Image (cartoon, helix red, strand yellow):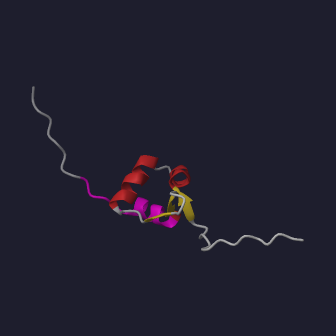
Amino acid sequence: MKKAARKRATPRPRDLWTLNAAAAETGLAKSTLYDRTESGDIPSIRLGCGTLVVRLSDVRAYQRKPRARGPRKKRAKK
């Protein structure tokens, strides 16, 4: 008798990447991805097993987005 194939409750889209994989693919640091998902700059999904995943397209969009830099600090004269 054949075993019935297990079906996932919700199919996972193909463009969801773990932060490790997304960091390796884009060249961003893993800590940067964690920080940006925490701040909401990059949308993320936490799976039932606790794994945090992101859409690679969202990470690429974050990379293309211009970011403002703060004012440069002047060096103190010695």
Q: Indicate whether 45 appears above or below 34.
A: below
Residue 73 is situated, as x and y percent measured from the top left of the image, at 16, 42
- 19 and 25: which one is in front? 19
Q: Indicate whether 13 appears above or below 75.
A: below
Q: Is residue 29 visible?
A: no
Please tell me how many numbered marks the rendered image carries.
Answer: 0
Q: Quadrant of residue 3?
A: bottom right
Looking at the image, which residue is at 14% across and 40% down?
74
Is-magenta flag for residue 22? no
What is the quadrant of the N terminus in the image? bottom right
Residue 14 is situated, as x and y percent measured from the top left of the image, at 61, 68
Q: Indicate whether 71 appears above or below 59.
A: above
Looking at the image, which residue is at 50% across and 49% down?
27
Residue 49 is situated, as x and y percent measured from the top left of the image, at 54, 59
Residue numbers of the magenta segment:
57-69
Looking at the image, which residue is at 55% across and 60% down?
17
Looking at the image, which residue is at 33% across and 59% down?
39
Apparent side of residue 6 relative to residue 60 in the rendered image (left or right)? right
- 9 and 33: which one is in front? 9
Q: Is residue 16 visible?
A: yes
Magenta part mainly helix, strand or loop?
helix
